[in-house]
Image (cartoon, rainbow, N blue to C red):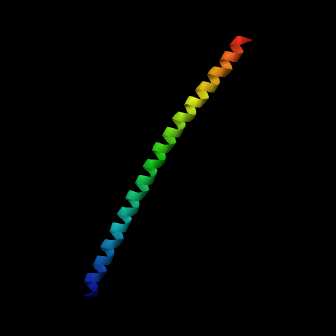
Amino acid sequence: MTRRSSGLRQRQKGVSAIEYGLLAALIALVAIVGIGALGSANGAGWDAWVAQVVAVIAGL
């Protein structure tokens, strides 16, 4: 009986490792998408700022 329950424990550990791996992959994916979206929005803001600076310099 102990041999059988020991095998079940080993399977549970394997399942937990897979779940943690999937969770880590999901968190990484969300972080990459979020940082990408933030970077795009930030880039658009800098482009607008540069355009204003160039317009001011051109007006001098």
Q: Decide if residue 21 is on the left or right side of residue 39.
A: left
**Residue 49 placement (x, y as % from top left):** 64, 26
Q: Decide if residue 28 is on the left or right side of residue 7.
A: right
* Residue at image location 59% in from the left, 30% down from the top: 45
**Residue 10 placement (x, y as % from top left):** 32, 74
Q: Is residue 29 above or below residue 24?
A: above
The residue closer to the viewer here, 21 or 47, is: 47
**Residue 2 placement (x, y as % from top left):** 28, 87
**Residue 47 placement (x, y as % from top left):** 59, 26
* Residue at image location 43% in from the left, 48% down from the top: 29
Q: Is residue 33 above or below residue 41?
A: below
In what quadrant of the picture does the C terminus appear?
Answer: top right
Residue furthest to the bottom in view is 1
Residue 8: image quadrant is: bottom left
* Residue at image location 25% in from the left, 82% down from the top: 4
Q: Is residue 58 above or below residue 32?
A: above
Residue 55: image quadrant is: top right
Residue furthest to the right in view is 60
Q: Is residue 16 above or below residue 48?
A: below
Residue 41: image quadrant is: top right
In what quadrant of the picture does the N terminus appear?
Answer: bottom left
